[in-house]
Image (cartoon, rainbow, N blue to C red):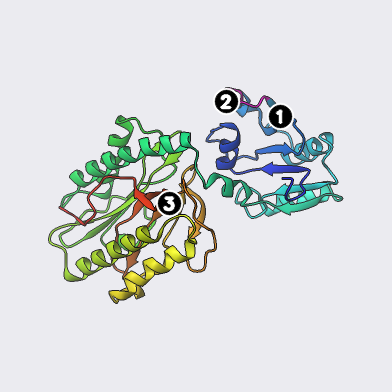
Amino acid sequence: MSERDLDALMVMGPEDIFYLTGFRSMGFFAWQVLVVTATERTPLMISRSLEEIMYRDNSWADEYLAYSDNDDPIRCTADALSELGVAGGRIGLPDRSVYVPAAHARRLGELLPSTTWVDTTEDVAKIRAIKSAAELDIVRRVAPLTAIGFHAGAEAASEGASENTIAAAFLHAIISAGSHQPASGPYIGAGHRAAFGHASWEGMRLSQGDVVFFEASACLHRYHAPLMRTISVGVPSDEVRALEEASLAGADAAIAAARPGVTAGEVDAACRGAVRGLGLDRYFKARVGYSVGIGFTNWIDGFSVRPGEQTVLAENMVMHLLPFLSTGKRAVALSESVLIGPEGAERLIDFERSLITC
């Protein structure tokens, strides 16, 4: 905050609020903001009256301003900023966040016209990207739960089974093993739906010759370790085998390139170069990966691994590297969650790195 000359920082996203306080309500669909001032004052949480008990249970901070469902939360926030003595100063607002509707941002500006608003959308996420020892301990405990779920999902897959069968097997296995509620997924698409990338289960039956896209993660204390694998119903076609080879080559190249001091863009280039070398780059249209960790609606924790991305990798970052290759009719992806160590990237999930054949 001192580097950006801020009098206050408004923290809005549930991941950022959780990171700073421990508060982990699933009620983040309503307006909530943690106000951190440049003084030594305890941060002030502004949220619904309904959330106060949980906040005080979860959080080390004890200042809470509750608004009722009949109150105007934006005016309550503006009044609180005035009472804190920061209105008219420089206030950080994550105005590119999905949790700051444009209408609410405009209204804050109208209520506090002398305030200078500074975009701080990525400020907390940049800090979150480098995990502490305690966070890494949780991630390492999540990883084998994800593997347990994938083993269960793979065993449930067979000709005639449905996407729902795989999803149920995955969720039953991870929850039984101790997982908390994942932020999203599992994403499962069979047949032509495999090419969708973000399809949820809808009961599609698995047919001979299908491929099934399968992405999911277990969760502990809101931390994730996701994985992508592809299921082949019956003997894979030559095209599917070629996509498998390219996805695995891309993942290997990305893992080899990912180490402290290189940029995320360089990791992207290494991955794409490997796929291009096999002549299948025309099927590689998505980003190579992203930082992963805390999640409420998804497990993406910050920056992307994409062309030209200048974020410099550092030790103790956790990333999901995912060469997703789609022909438009089918897709294959073999991804890995990795930890950036002092010498390079370490795979976190022990699961077979090949097509799952059923």
In the image shown, does 216 or 158 lie closer to the viewer? 216
Task: Count the labels in the image.
Answer: 3
The three-letter code of the residue at mark 1 reads Thr
Q: Amino acid at mark 2?
A: Met
Disc 3, SS: strand
Residue on which disc 1 sits: 42
Q: Residues within 10 Å of mark 1 (few under 14, many from 20)?
A: few
User: Does 155 sit left or right of 103 as displayed?
Assistant: left
Element on which disc 2 rests: helix
Q: Residue 353 got which mark?
A: none
Q: Helix, strand or loop at disc 1?
A: loop
Regarding residue 181, the answer to whether it shows in the image is: no
Does residue 328 sit above or below 60 in this rendering? below
**In this rendering, position of residue 33 left or right of residue 217:** right
Circle 3: residue type: Met
User: Which residues are the magenta region?
Assistant: 56-62
Sequence-earlier tag: 3 or 1: 1
Q: Position of residue 98 (x, y in %)?
A: 60, 51
> Residue 233: where, in percent of width, then height?
17, 57
Residue occupied by mark 2: 54
- Front residue of 307/284: it is 307
For label 3, the residue is 319
Residue drawn at the location 56% of the way across and 31% of the way down: 22
Please provide percent x and percent y for residue 348.
34, 45
Say whether marks 2 and 3 touch (CB < 8 Å). Answer: no
Cα distance between the residues tagged 3 and 1: 32 Å
Residue 77: x percent and y percent? 75, 38
